[in-house]
Image (tube, rainbow, N blue to C red):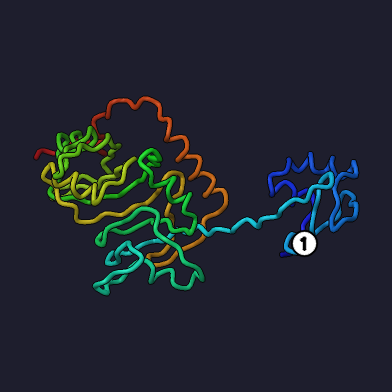
């Protein structure tokens, strides 16, 4: 490992804050390899021994995790391997250089944003039921959706296994004869949930794309490609998941907004 300032090493190991570490160094209470150090000195955490007031500090390297956003295309399954030999999302990140795993899932016929990481704690936080980070989907259904169907889905519907879904936020993007394009935000992730929600009110999903998860948006990322998340995006996702553990009371779902006047059915 490259050399680092001693106050940073002490802070990273949880000994004290960086500012407090600077004060310890200035007071002559810190030694590296048995020798007193001064402010600005550096050490190699892999080889050098640091002590405070004569007590050795055990330096543990922090693992550097990787966080990816993949644009999953249709036709790939979200699993680490498949006994039937079908294409999996792991094929799309084979050149990453380490083993990463999907955070949640998108079914074979769905596409869009899929997070992948080797940080198990991060994945658990986002997929745990109490996490509830909102996921935004663009969904095309047929036939044309009625207001009654949309309101039912927004309020919560009983799925084929007897479980009622949580309220969802639904907006109408395109409303035309034969089909409707919806934007649906969910805060839970049941298996094939949107397809089953639509089926429960008599609608068929003909295209489903996840375009955002919490504060992170898919943007212009091309299908089949991935990019690393920025540190700010990882932090924002963590914060969104932690806030969702203590949600404020949710207002009753409003009637869906349709662009322009409704046509006769």
Query: Picture quarter containing residue 91?
Result: bottom left
- On screen, residue 122 above or below 99: above
Q: Nearer the viewer, residue 99 or 58?
A: 58
Q: Is residue 127 left or right of residue 171?
A: right
Where is residue 115? Give x, y as percent: 42, 56
How many dots with numbers? 1
What residue appears at the point 80 percent right and 54 percent down from the top-left corner? 50
Q: Nearer the viewer, residue 189 or 110?
A: 189
SS class of the residue under badge 1? loop
Where is residue 182? Give x, y as percent: 26, 45
**Quick one: which residue is furthest to the front in this view?**
55
What residue appears at the point 32 percent right and 25 percent down from the top-left corner? 251
What residue appears at the point 20 percent right and 33 percent down from the top-left corner? 151
What residue appears at the point 42 percent right and 61 percent down from the top-left corner? 101
**Quick one: which residue is furthest to the left in this view?**
265
Q: Nearer the viewer, residue 164 or 176?
A: 164
Query: Picture quarter containing residue 253?
Result: top left
Q: Which residue is mark 1?
A: 44
Q: Quadrant of the N terminus?
A: bottom right
Q: Quadrant of the C terminus?
A: top left
- On screen, residue 179 above or below 83: above
Q: Is residue 147 left or right of residue 250?
A: left
Q: Is residue 19 left or right of residue 81?
A: right
């Amino acid at each position: 490992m490259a050399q680092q300032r001693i106050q940073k090493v002490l802070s990273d190991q949880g000994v004290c804050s960086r500012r407090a570490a600077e004060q310890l160094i200035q007071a002559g209470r810190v030694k590296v390899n048995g020798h007193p150090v001064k402010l600005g000195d550096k050490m190699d955490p892999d080889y050098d021994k640091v002590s405070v007031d004569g007590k050795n500090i055990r330096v543990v390297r922090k693992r550097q995790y990787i966080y990816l956003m993949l644009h999953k295309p249709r036709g790939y399954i979200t699993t680490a391997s498949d006994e039937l030999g079908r294409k999996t999302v792991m094929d799309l990140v084979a050149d990453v250089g380490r083993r990463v795993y999907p955070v949640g899932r998108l079914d074979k016929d769905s596409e869009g944003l899929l997070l992948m990481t080797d940080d198990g704690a991060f994945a658990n936080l986002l997929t745990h039921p109490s996490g509830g980070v909102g996921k935004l989907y663009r969904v095309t259904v047929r036939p044309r959706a009625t207001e009654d169907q949309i309101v039912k889905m927004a309020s919560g519907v009983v799925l084929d296994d007897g479980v009622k879904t949580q309220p969802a936020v639904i907006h109408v993007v395109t409303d035309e004869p034969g089909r409707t394009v919806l934007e649906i935000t969910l805060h839970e992730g049941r298996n094939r949930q949107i397809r089953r929600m639509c089926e429960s009110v008599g609608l068929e999903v003909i295209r489903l794309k996840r375009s955002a998860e919490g504060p992170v948006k898919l943007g212009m990322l091309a299908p089949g490609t991935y990019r690393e998340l920025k540190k700010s995006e990882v932090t924002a996702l963590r914060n969104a998941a932690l806030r969702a553990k203590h949600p404020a009371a949710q207002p009753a779902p409003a009637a869906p907004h349709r662009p322009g006047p409704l046509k006769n059915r």
